[in-house]
Image (cartoon, rainbow, N blue to C red):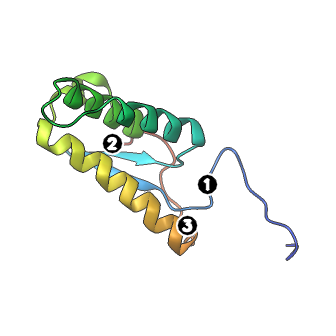
Amino acid sequence: MNENRLSISTKKSLFSPIEVEIDGKVFIIEKLPAPIFDKLLEMEKTLKGPEDLAFFRVLADEVQLLTGADRETVDQIDFRDLKQVVQFVLRKAGEIYTQGPEKKESGPEAIPSA
């Protein structure tokens, strides 16, 4: 390994995956590419607050985008939990960013896994 080179793959992240469990099914977020963050930012800009009826639909869209869960599953989540999922993923991404990559353990690679 060359100390003067950082090798990055578009297929896998250097960072550990983030896991979200919904009804016992674990969804693994392997990477968070820029287009997903751009989409999240675009969605967030449209929100005025919980009094906005579109607020909860946008949160459902964000959860589906982040986890890869099917729409039927996402639509079953309590609206109060939707924001928790988005905040959890973004918080974990921020922690990983500030702490740097962890040594990855071998494990599942697909979204979603059962």
Which of pointers 1 and 3 indicates the residue nearer the eye? 1
Q: Is residue 77 left or right of residue 20?
A: left
Rendered location of residue 18, percent (x, y): 42, 55
- Between marks 3 and 2, how big is the CA–CA gap? 20 Å
Q: Which mark is residue 111?
A: none
* Depth order, front residue of 83/72: 83
Q: Residue at x 79, y 65 (%)?
A: 6
Q: Residue at x 19, y 26 (%)?
A: 75
Rendered location of residue 34, percent (x, y): 59, 42
Quarter of the image where the N terminus is located: bottom right
* First of labels 1, 3 by sequence position: 1
Quarter of the image where the C terminus is located: top left
Please indicate, yes or no, whether residue 6 appears anywhere in the rendered image: yes
The kind of secondary structure element at disc 2 is loop
Looking at the image, residue 82 lies above or below residue 84: above
Looking at the image, residue 34 lies above or below residue 94: above
> Which residue type does callout 1 highlight?
Ser
* Depth order, front residue of 45/37: 45
Which of pointers 1 and 2 indicates the residue nearer the eye? 1
Q: Is residue 66 left or right of residue 23?
A: right
| Residue topped by disc 2 | 114
* Depth order, front residue of 83/31: 83
| Residue topped by disc 1 | 13
* Depth order, front residue of 109/85: 85
The kind of secondary structure element at disc 1 is loop
Q: Residues within 10 Å of mark 3 (few under 14, many from 20)?
A: few
> Which residue type does callout 3 highlight?
Lys
